[in-house]
Amino acid sequence: MKLAAIVGIILIIIGILGFAYGGLGWTTQKKDAQLGPLEITHKESHGFAFPPIASGICILGGVVLVIVGSRKS
């Protein structure tokens, strides 16, 4: 398999995951204060969004690369 086809398959997978999940998010727990046995914490949400247009571009580019990579030279 050519490198272009491999990169194309990876882009298609990224595009499908982008449509399925719409981004990546995670939560962290931070400790604010501790007074003896009493502990005060809060949760923070982090992440980034993956817009649908970017997912579409990844899939389209991946398909093009798979087609170009599969041609025999």
Image: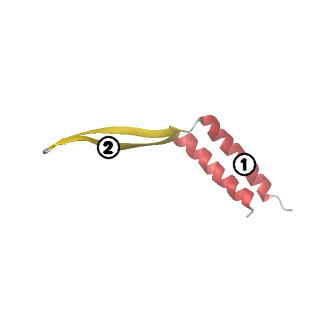
Residue 55 x, y percent position in the rendering: 62, 40
At horizontal 64% and vertical 35% (from top left) the residue drawn is 53
At horizontal 77% and vertical 53% (from top left) the residue drawn is 67
At horizontal 66% and vertical 44% (from top left) the residue drawn is 58
**Distance Cα–Cα, label 2 vs label 1:** 41 Å
| In this rendering, position of residue 17 left or right of residue 70 | left
Query: In the rendered image of this protein, does residue 5 appear above or below residue 43?
Result: below
The residue that disc 1 covers is 63
Residue 61 x, y percent position in the rendering: 72, 46
Q: Amino acid at mark 1?
A: Val
Of mark 2 and mark 1, the one earlier in the sequence is 2
| In this rendering, position of residue 48 left or right of residue 32 | right
At horizontal 68% and vertical 40% (from top left) the residue drawn is 57
Query: In the rendered image of this protein, does residue 43 appear above or below residue 7?
Result: above
Q: Secondary structure at mark 1?
A: helix
* Residue 66 occupies quadrant: bottom right
> Dividing the image into 4 quarters, which one contains the C terminus?
bottom right
Q: Which mark is residue 29?
A: 2
Depth check, front residue: 67 or 51: 51
Q: Amino acid at mark 2?
A: Gln
Q: Secondary structure at mark 2?
A: strand
